[in-house]
Image: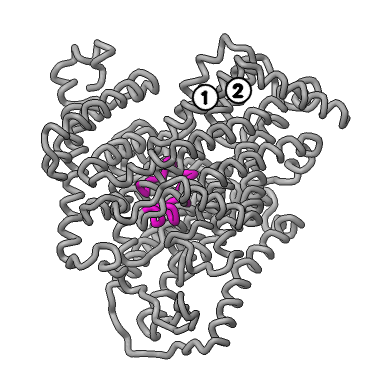
Amino acid sequence: MESDILSAAISALDIVTTPERMLFLIVGILLGLVVAVLPGIGGIAGLSLLLPFTFDMDPFSAFAVMMGLGSVIATGDLIPAILFGVPGGVGSAATVLDGFPMARRGEAGRALGAGYFASILGGLFGALILAISVPVMRPVVMLFGSPEMLALCVFGLSLVASLSGSSPLKGLAAASLGVLFACIGDDPQTGTLRWTFDSLYLWDGMPISPVALGLFAIPELADIAIARTSIVAKDIYRATAKSQWEGTRDVLKNWWLMIRCSAIGSGLGAMPGLGASVIDWIAYGHAVRTEKNPENFGSGDVRGVIASESSNNAKEGGALIPTIAFGVPGSASMALILGAFLIHGIVPGPDMLTKHLDVTYSLMWSVAFANVIGGGICIVFSNQIAKIALLRYGILLPPVLAVTFVGAYAGSASWGDIFVTIGFGIFAWIMKRFGWPRPPMVLGFVLGGLIERYMFISVERYQSEFLSRPIVFFMLVFTIWGIALPIWRKYRREIAAGRPKRHLKKAEFTPQTGMSLAFIAIFLFAIVTAIPWEFGARLVPLAFATAGLLCTLGYMIMTMFFTPRMVAKADPVSGQVTFKPTTELLVDLKSEFGDMEGREVYRRFAVYLGWLLLFVAAGYVVGLLPAMLVFMLLYMRYGGGESWSLTLKVAAPIFAIWYGLFHHLLHLPWPPSLIGDFFPALRSTYWLSLF
């Protein structure tokens, strides 16, 4: 058996390295990098575009071009995540937390270098896991049924305590709210319409792309618009080869973290249904929970970039395991790879481990080469890419905002996606100002559907007995231990250092209390409206609304009736530890916007919202794609104060590229506009069917 595997691996290497197939691989890599830098578009659109062109290829060439594209999506996603604070895809959302702060303080080159190198090593690790798991993949994957998958999802949610800064209760409340948002729509078990408010758009729930872009892209772009400066000032800009090498050294220095997170990415990637939107958060939470000085995460710690990016790329190799062994796609992109299998007459299953071992290992080699070549291309051009952060906000912001909205629209090709993005963006900006964590909310959202599916099956089939299954019991114990141990260690450490105890105080109503009351109102509304539903429809909503309510009440009581929690602050020079109260009432605006008054900050945010609504209005009148051009022209000229000459020089070529990409290559179905209703002849011409 071992000799057959070795000979198949060598044969596959010989096939993949032929000039023709390497050319197809490089074409796929370049297309993947282009698609990756567009927020919200992701690898699904790119693979969907490629699939029809693979019909007349031989299987090895077809898989080379598709795996080339799919393998580098996560690598390219980190470019907008680090430079703009806009996740290129849902799998790079965790990279924003530390990558964007690093870029803002002039360390874009270091962040990009660390991200690229971690991506390369993570991708190679995933390919290695695929190679060595071929003989043993079937029995391992078969061990996980619905109860085990539920326990795995609960473990993922337990990481919110690590993603919530100084207040785990706020994180648990935000995660519970994210699960409730995931429950919106037609309940798959009973057909009950939950919180759709007579909107057809909400029947199918909200796609992840507009939610993720709303939670992370809109608030970060709002801060750039409010500050009215470049992402990074020229006097602190550093994206040289030396700074990239510094990021590479960071990965080598944290090699054990990279290996652990790559293993998490590969292992969870092999679990069908989890997907990229969960894996990076679980790896990031693991890093926060296990690394020293976890308080540095979220403010520009390179370890956060390493954890997220290594797991992102490693997942591709893991996702191929159930696709090959069972014909069960490990992710949405793997569903398209599965389609390519069937197109070329290759049926996934036992034959992939016997008759078609050469095909299996050609996929492994394609993943490995794609990660090395794609990461190498990014490293070579990293300095040029990072210079985007030096652009004035009036030039940078309009194109990024416009493509963010198109990326959101690609979620379900509905105007509802745009409104969800704006709505979540406003809510997320308020959460950011009040110090409420956003990562737990998006983690709850992406896990909500999985939790509901696995909980319903587990309860209906096993009742409470599923809790006694060995893997479930072990994972739940590990979850509790993982939550309690870091909190207990930190408490003991701070008490030993002389941290003052908290005391009762006179009740005090603060803006933070008002935010807590808003959360409480939402949870109470969810409980009251969910009670009349059938058991299957109300099981998860009631459980998480109650949990969120209790967490929010606990947090509100602690902030109203107890003195602020004291946290240790170490002096970077002397190392002396002092204790200061947590700044949980409001985020210090001066740390974000200098000496700008709070009233001016909120006024500029209102102006920013006005520009967003202008984009939506223009889309209704002239169509979404032409609105991108209108928005860029008006914002650059009047919002950014640029000259008409420069505005036209920048906007015209960008729009031409978008027109060719979105209309002619991706074939996005544009929504109807008023001008199209008045002049229906426009829609009969393909070149003008934008309206």
Q: Quadrant of the N terminus?
A: top right
Distance between the alpha carbons at the discs numbered 2 and 1: 8 Å
For badge 1, the amino acid type reads Gly
- Residue 526 makes an appearance in the image: yes
For badge 2, the amino acid type reads Ala
Considering the whole magenta stretch, tell me its main secondary structure.
helix
- Contact between marks 2 and 1 (CB within 8 A): the answer is yes
Identify which residue, 210 or 407, lies in the foreground. 407
- Residue 194 makes an appearance in the image: no
Q: Magenta stretch containing residue 85, yes or no?
A: yes
Q: Position of residue 502 (x, y in %)?
A: 45, 87
The residue wearing badge 1 is 28
| Residue under the image location 53 percent in, 64 percent down | 162
Query: For the magenta stretch, what is the residue range?
Result: 84-103
Q: Quadrant of the C terminus?
A: top left
- Looking at marks 2 and 1 on the same chain, the residue that comes earlier in the sequence is marked by 1
